[in-house]
Amino acid sequence: MLKLLGAVLILAATTWTGIEAAKVYTERPRQIRQLRAALQSLEAEIMYGHTPLHTASQQIAKQLAKPVSCLFDSFSKQLDRGSDSAKTAWEQSLKKVWNTMSMKKSEYDVLKQFGETLGLHDRVSQQKHIKLALNHLEAAETDAERAQAKNEKMLKSLGFLAGLLLILLLM
């Protein structure tokens, strides 16, 4: 009876480990979609609402789930504190929140490049920069979905099978 309980615990632990390892592949496309939606909302607020950047960021943060909402919330707070520029506030917010996100360096580079143009141009030019960032994020989302399809199921199965192997070796 004790062996059976141990086997169940081992199997549960390794399966859970596999699921946790696969979570990165599940979260990345979802977070990229959220970022794309956030940038589209930002574009609408800038173009049609004539909303100040800190107010628009605050509204967008309320609409999103964590950790993407934390990026826009932090950005809004940095602007409210009187940061030197929107670029500086964006970079500081990105650095602060990045470790909680499941994205790669390529997405970081796209967002950093986008932040360099924030608040420097008129509305039409800003819209072009937002669209450019959206195009880059769309390509990254396609890549993330491909990686998810390739690796997520494998990692979950690997966790389960590693548990079975360990149980067989210990019995």
Image (spheres, rainbow, N blue to C red):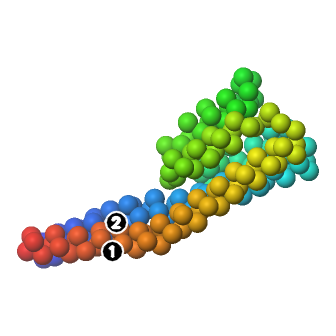
Mark number displayed over residue 18 = 2
Identity of the residue drawn at 58% across and 66% down: 142
Q: Which residue is mark 1?
A: 157
Name the N-terminal-most of marks 1 and 2: 2
Residue 68 x %, y %:
62, 50
- Residue 40 is drawn in which quadrant? bottom right
Q: Where is the N terminus found, in terms of image quarters?
A: bottom left
Pick the quarter of the image with the C terminus: bottom left
Q: Position of residue 81 (x, y in %)?
A: 72, 25
- Could you say which is closer to the camera, residue 163 or residue 33? 33
Taking the spot 12% from the left edge, 75% from the top edge, the residue there is 168
Residue at disc 1, secondary structure: helix
Can see residue 30? no
The residue drawn where x is 57% and y is 45% is 108
Please tell me how crowded label 2 is: few (under 14), some (14-19), or many (20+) other residues with Cα within 10 Å. Answer: many
Residue 108 position (above or below residue 91): below
Tell me, yes or no, whether the two marked residues, 1 and 2, touch with CB atoms within 8 Å: yes
